[in-house]
C-alpha cells in the first residue's frame, strides 16, 4: 500500500477539483517539475488511488427524475449466494452504487430512473426476481442536500 505524502495530497486535491488540468499547469500550481508531477500521478494510478477520470452529471438535468436507495436482505449468506447477488445487481445500468452493510440490511443500492413508472418496472421485474432476496425496502430521494465526491486531505 502506498503511503501518501503532502505533495500527493496536493495533487489529489487539485485533480478532484478539475481532472482535466494539464500536468504542466498542475506542476506549476504545486511547485514541482513536469516530470516529477507526471510520475506521481502515474504512481497514484498504478496503486489504484486514482481509479479513473470521470465527468459528474446532474441526474435531474440529464432526465433522471427518480433516485432511490433500496435496502436489501438476503435469505442466505453463503459466499456463493452473496457473489451471485453482487454479480447480478452490479450488472444493472440503473444501479449506480452497491454497498454491503452491517446491521439490519445486507446491502444498499442506489438506483436512478427517468420516472416513477420506470423505477417501479425495475423494482418489480429486476430486483424482485433476483434469487435469494428475502426483503427489500425502497426510499425515494425527495431532495439532495449534499452530493460530493471529494476527499479532503
Image (cartoon, helix red, strand yellow):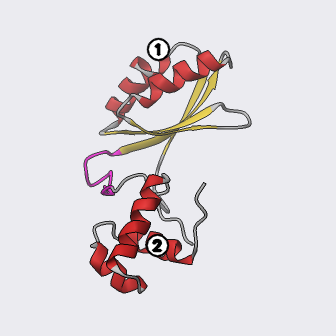
Quadrant (top left/top right/bottom left/bottom right) for the C terminus: bottom right
Q: Residue at x 47, y 47 (%)?
A: 141
Q: Is residue 123 left or right of residue 108?
A: left
The Cα–Cα distance between marks 2 and 1, rounded to whole angstroms, is 42 Å
Q: Position of residue 63 (x, y in %)?
A: 25, 47
Which residue in the structure is indicated by mark 2? Answer: 13
Q: Which structural element holds mark 2?
A: helix
Which residue is found at the position 38% from the left and 32% from the top? 119
Please state which of residues 94 and 63 is positioned toward the viewer in this rendering. 94
Rendered position, 18 above or below 24: above
Sequence-first disc among 2 and 1: 2
Question: Quick one: 150 or 116, which is closer to the camera?
Answer: 150
> Quick check: is 72 in the magenta stretch?
no
Image coords of residue 106 (percent x, y): 65, 30
Asked if 26 appears above or below 102 in the picture, the reply is below
> Which disc is residue 67 wearing?
none
Q: Which residues are magenta?
A: 54-65
Horizontal and vertical percent position of residue 51? 43, 52
Query: For the residue carrying disc 1, how many other residues have a C-alpha within 10 Å: few (<14), some (14-19), or many (20+)?
Result: few
Q: Residue at x 46, y 69 (%)?
A: 12
State whether residue 153 appears in this view.
Answer: yes
| Crowd tier of the residue under label 2, counting other residues whose Cα lies within 10 Å: few below 14, some 14–19, many 20 or above | some
Task: Tell me, for residue 129, which label it has, or none.
Answer: 1
**Dominant secondary structure of the residues highlighted in magenta in the image:** loop
Residue 42 position by quadrant: bottom left
Q: Quadrant of the N terminus?
A: bottom right
Above-or-below relation of 35 to 134: below
Quadrant of residue 76 within the rendered picture: top right
Disc nearest the viewer among 2 and 1: 2
- Magenta stretch contains residue 56: yes
Q: Is residue 56 left or right of residue 132?
A: left
Amino acid at each position: 500500500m502506498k503511503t501518501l505524502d503532502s505533495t500527493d495530497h496536493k495533487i489529489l486535491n487539485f485533480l478532484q477539483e478539475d481532472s482535466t488540468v494539464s500536468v504542466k499547469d498542475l506542476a506549476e500550481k504545486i511547485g514541482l517539475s513536469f516530470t516529477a508531477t507526471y510520475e506521481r500521478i502515474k504512481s497514484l494510478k498504478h496503486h489504484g488511488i486514482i481509479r479513473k477520470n470521470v465527468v459528474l452529471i446532474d441526474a435531474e438535468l440529464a432526465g433522471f427524475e427518480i433516485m432511490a436507495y433500496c435496502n436489501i436482505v438476503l435469505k442466505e449468506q453463503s459466499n456463493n449466494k452473496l457473489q451471485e447477488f453482487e454479480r447480478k445487481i452490479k450488472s444493472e445500468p440503473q444501479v449506480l452504487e452497491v454497498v454491503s452493510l452491517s446491521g439490519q440490511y445486507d446491502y444498499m443500492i442506489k438506483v436512478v430512473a427517468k420516472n416513477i413508472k420506470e423505477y417501479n418496472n425495475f423494482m418489480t421485474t429486476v430486483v424482485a426476481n433476483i434469487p435469494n432476496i428475502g426483503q427489500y425496502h425502497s426510499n425515494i430521494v425527495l431532495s439532495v442536500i449534499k452530493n460530493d465526491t471529494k476527499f479532503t486531505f
